Image: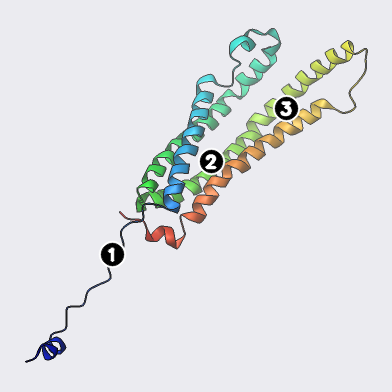
Amino acid sequence: MSDADAAVHNPPPAQGPTARPPDHSGTAKTIGILSIVFGGLVALSDLFELLVGGRPIGPAARDVNVAPILEMTRRIQPFTQTRAGLMFFMSLSLALIGIGLIKHRESARKAALVWALAGFAVLGIRAWLWETKIWPTMEPAMREMMKLTMERAERASGGQKPPFDIATLVSTMAHAGEYINLGFLAIFPALLLILMNLSAVKERMHR
């Protein structure tokens, strides 16, 4: 039998598709690095809030004019501490998930999706705490402090009043600032939900 006939009757064994090695770059790795950085920075901020509790520190703590602020802080502290504790836990979890994403772990991708959904729930809790517990206590105190400040300013300027209500402006800015912050924090879980569901990301994950 010739070599040609042998090749026809004995074809080489078929080979399956070559397994593609994990891609150690790209979207998952980038999101992993951002998760570690973002989670770490927010965790440090929340840890500081847990330790300090919003109380004035340094020379400001000895200022007699901060007594109303101290009283307001004392009244809202249980709620601000709850908020900081939730955020601290979520931030540490995100940093750990980021380590898994850098290693292209499928479990980390799934954990990131769960974290994103939980993140929206935590932001909802933060909004609820703000509207029902924190802001109703802060707003009257802030208005009272601004009223006293404006009265002193009027006496110093000979009774001249400002052209607009500064207390209302400060109150509105403080309220709006909280929701701007919540909107900023919502960007990352939204990105995770989108990017971690991309086919290109799923294909490059491994156990």
Residue shown at 65%/35% (left/top)? 178
- Determine whether 159 is above or below 140 in the image: above
Distance of label 1 from label 3 (alpha carbons)? 62 Å
Q: Is residue 199 left or right of residue 3?
A: right
Q: Position of residue 172 (x, y in %)?
A: 76, 33
Distance of label 1 from label 2 (alpha carbons)? 40 Å
Q: Earlier in the sequence, mark 1 or mark 2?
A: 1
The front one of 80 and 162 is 162
Q: Earlier in the sequence, mark 1 or mark 3?
A: 1
Q: Quadrant of the C terminus?
A: bottom left
Q: Position of residue 18 (x, y in %)?
A: 27, 67
Q: Quadrant of the N terminus?
A: bottom left
| Residue type at numbered disc 2 | Val
Q: Residue furthest left?
A: 1
Mark 3: which secondary structure? helix
Residue shown at 53%/41% (left/top)? 122
The residue that disc 3 covers is 139
Distance of label 3 from label 2 (alpha carbons)? 23 Å
Task: Name the mark nearer the viewer: 1 or 2.
Answer: 1
Mark 1: which secondary structure? loop
Res 57 → quadrant = top right
| Within-10-Å neighbours for mark 1: few <14, some 14–19, many 20+ | few
| Residue type at numbered disc 3 | Glu
The residue that disc 2 covers is 122
The front one of 203 and 111 is 203
Residue shown at 82%/26% (left/top)? 166
The residue that disc 1 covers is 19
- Determine whether 134 is above or below 52 in the image: below
Q: Position of residue 124 (x, y in %)?
A: 58, 42
Report if the CB atoms under discs 1 and 3 are less than 8 Å apart. no
Residue shown at 85%/27% (left/top)? 165
